[in-house]
Amino acid sequence: MGLALTASCTKLDEKELLYDQVVQDQFFQSNRELVSAVGAAYTNLYGFRGGLTNVNEVTTDEIVVPTRGADWGDGGHWVRLKLHTYKPNDSEVNGAWNMLYAGVNGCNRLLATLEPLGTAQSIAFIAELKSLRAIYYYWLLDIYGNVPLSTDFKDITPPPNSTRKQVYDFVEKELLDNVAKLPKTGPNDQSTYGRVNFYTAQAALAKLYLNAEVYTGAAQWDKCIAACDQIINSGKYSLTLNYKDNFVKDNTGASEFIWAIPFDQVHAKGFNLNHQTLHQESQKTYNMTAQPWNGFATVAEFYNSYIDPTQNPGPQGTVVGLDPKGTPTTGTVDKRLSNFLVGPQFDANGVRLLDGASDPEDPDGQPITFTPYMNQLEPRAWRQTGARINKWEFYNGMTSDLSNDVAIFRYADFLLAKAEAIARKNSNWNDPIAMALVNQIRTQHGGVTPFVTMTDVSFLAERGREMFFEAFRRQDMIRFDKYNKAFTFHPADADKHVNILPIPEAQINANQKLKQNPGY
């Protein structure tokens, strides 16, 4: 029984839901009961596409949430994410913290019950919960840095901050101590689908080591390579033949899914990208059950990174109209440009969509045309500007929640991680092994010519094309020293303290032992 069967109240009977209200001799007796209980520690992941993704994407060159007149003002917190002027009381800053510590608390609660059992059935689940808790802390150390460590559910004394190095050491030790106890199952094994297994823990270690120099000041390239090799050499994962296969509606068990969240529009809600990004009138395109919100988009600078103007147009054709005047740009087009929705929009019957509230200054007028060009971040971004996010398949009859599963750790990411670690270890971006790993992805997923030479700049661009909107761009830009530089709608940062977010004001008010991160 995988996570897909434990995340939904509609799929569990009342006894299974009340696992925390029965005595030990009446519960935790069967594997099914244990799986049901452990599933509660995963439910916070259904908020992955909320604050956690937002703080890792809207802060970067990939995603923008412009203020479109009266829409998406929201007290200015979306603009502050882009400008890196976020505050301790901003909703997304607080939301990511709450989601992650709710996960930690859920693990601690279950461990407090399972560890005293000492049964053969409980041992594997203890290792799973400790590894899951370590991953929640990996995200916390990445985003907030100096966070409190809490591992005892019965200890109600609020802990002080730990240093980032202390949290790093805890995450590494917990993963290393428990990884060998986890099952070596693959993406098609429904018994562990959506749950932490051996390869999930190795993936978490690889990400930890890839960013170790940022977290601790000491690089760990060999350790990163070794963790990646555990995944790559297992034979359980492979690149999908087509990039889009990872993101279609029926993508459960995709060959790249090391760890995925099994979303479902009825039983496992929380993935509402269609509402975040599509125009209100797009409801008529997909016969959606409710109006979208016309918000999240990308800008021409990032969109254009998928087009190589130095080469002749390839089989993917030519892109036209990248600015409001329709100035054409030609070049080889990466197949992963399908990550975006641009151009004239129509309803389900092929009739042109119109926006009666279109901005008078918008040269496209009322006929809705999504353009990579965006006139401004605030206060009056035109209602149809910005390439919309089209990475996950949109389908007829969508509700407010999508049924596409979302990979947290995906195989392609760890080919790229190994390539980067090799290149950095050898101080050579043209290392042949690193180049071969990158070109596997570039040719199969992008459908473009392999790199003949590679630099840190071209590598980061390739990571962006492949891993767009998968919640790692912020840490990638920090690792490549690009996060604090100027990019569209973001002036250069005056100080690097913004590389970690402020500890939420509500948490400091509730725990006087906590100290705010420097600079806030």
Image (cartoon, rainbow, N blue to C red):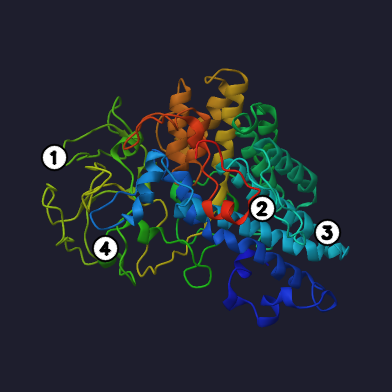
Q: Please, which residue is most extreme toward the bottom here?
A: 14
* Badge 3 amino acid: Ile
Picture quadrant where residue 292 is located: bottom left
Q: CA distance from mark 1 to mark 2?
A: 49 Å
Image mark for residue 186: 2
Q: Is residue 256 left or right of residue 72?
A: right
Residue at screen point 27% across, 48% down = 342
Among numbered discs 3 and 2, the one appearing first in the sequence? 3
Q: Quadrant of the N terminus?
A: bottom right
Among numbered discs 1 and 4, the one appearing first in the sequence? 4
Q: Is residue 24 left or right of residue 170?
A: right
Q: Which residue is mark 4?
A: 280
Q: Is residue 459 left or right of residue 206?
A: left
Callout 4 environment at 10 Å: few (<14), some (14 to 19), or many (20+)? some
Q: Is residue 197 left or right of residue 331?
A: right
Asked if the residue at tag 2 contacts the one at tag 1, i.e. Cβ–Cβ closer than 8 Å, the answer is no
Q: Which residue is mark 3?
A: 123
Determine whether 473 is above or below 270 in the image. above
Q: Disc 3 or disc 2, which is closer to the eye?
A: 3
Q: Which residue is mark 1?
A: 325
* Badge 4 amino acid: Gln
* Badge 2 amino acid: Gly
Q: Disc 1 or disc 4, which is closer to the eye?
A: 4
